[in-house]
Image (cartoon, rainbow, N blue to C red):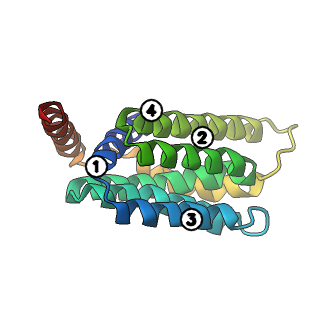
């Protein structure tokens, strides 16, 4: 599965989660985002990146759909790898994106929430490409360089398209259309 495919699937998952989210899910997600925001970035970025990724995984739980939970779980692992690769320099960007996402979820604006996660993850992907390009240039000295080797190794497994991708994508589209149809009827 490519990065773009995963981002689009997660965006659809977030839209569905927004429509199905209970106050309990929203409270748990808010608590997770708040806890991650309070962690210091510099001494232990790996732990903070994992906390941010956990929030992404919780979005799948809010859908109540096992396939979407797997998509969000996969996206959480991918998000961790990307966040870990870009390092603590992305802390403010991630924190602010999660706060905006929570605002859209609280307002029940599914389309804005989906766009926010798409824009946010594409931005992180762009940052990762910049970091990789800088590391490839031997004369450049880049802070966070030590993180890139491990993150690149972790990310390699996500470049392989799993055999169930088409089935998962179809399920996400079908679920999204069903929910949109129900929303229009009410």
Which mark is first along the chain, 3 or 4? 3
User: In the rendering, at what x and y percent does residue 69 appear?
Assistant: 29, 58
Q: Secondary structure at mark 2?
A: helix
Q: Secondary structure at mark 4?
A: helix
Residue corresponding to mark 3: 51
Q: CA distance from mark 3 to mark 1?
A: 26 Å
Residue 51 placement, left or right of 87: left
Can you say whether 79 is above or below 39 in the image? above
Residue corresponding to mark 4: 115
Q: CA distance from mark 4 to mark 3?
A: 22 Å
Q: CA distance from mark 1 to mark 4?
A: 25 Å
Residue 53 placement, left or right of 42: left
Q: Are marks 1 and 2 in contact (CB under 8 Å)?
A: no
Q: CA distance from mark 2 to mark 4?
A: 14 Å
Which mark is first along the chain, 4 or 2? 4
Q: Secondary structure at mark 1?
A: loop
Residue depth check, mark 4 versus mark 3: number of the one nearer the observer: 4
Residue corresponding to mark 1: 162
Which mark is first along the chain, 4 or 1? 4
Which mark is first along the chain, 1 or 3? 3
Residue corresponding to mark 2: 124
User: In the rendering, at what x and y percent does residue 53 appear?
Assistant: 51, 58
Is residue 143 something one can see in this rendering?
Answer: yes
Identified at 22% across, 42% down, the residue is 172
User: In the rendering, at what x and y percent does residue 80 appear?
Assistant: 54, 57
Q: CA distance from mark 3 to mark 2?
A: 16 Å
Residue depth check, mark 1 versus mark 2: number of the one nearer the observer: 2
Can you say whether 14 is above or below 72 in the image? above
Which mark is first along the chain, 2 or 3? 3
């Amino acid at each position: 599965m490519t990065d773009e495919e995963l981002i689009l699937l997660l965006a659809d998952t977030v839209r569905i989660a927004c429509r199905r989210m209970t106050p309990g899910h929203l409270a748990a997600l808010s608590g997770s985002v708040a806890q991650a925001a309070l962690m210091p970035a510099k001494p232990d970025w790996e732990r903070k990146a994992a906390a941010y990724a956990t929030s992404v995984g919780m979005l799948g739980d809010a859908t109540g759909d096992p396939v979407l939970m797997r998509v969000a779980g996969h996206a959480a692992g991918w998000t961790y790898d990307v966040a870990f690769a870009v390092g603590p320099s992305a802390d403010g960007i991630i924190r602010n994106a999660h706060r905006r996402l929570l605002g859209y979820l609280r307002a029940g604006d599914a389309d804005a929430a989906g766009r926010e996660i798409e824009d946010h993850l594409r931005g992180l992907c762009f940052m990762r490409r910049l970091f990789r390009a800088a590391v490839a240039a031997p004369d450049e000295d880049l802070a966070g360089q030590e993180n890139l080797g491990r993150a690149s190794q972790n990310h390699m497994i996500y470049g392989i398209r799993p055999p169930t991708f088409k089935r998962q994508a179809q399920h996400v589209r079908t679920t999204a259309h069903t929910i949109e149809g129900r929303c229009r009827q009410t």
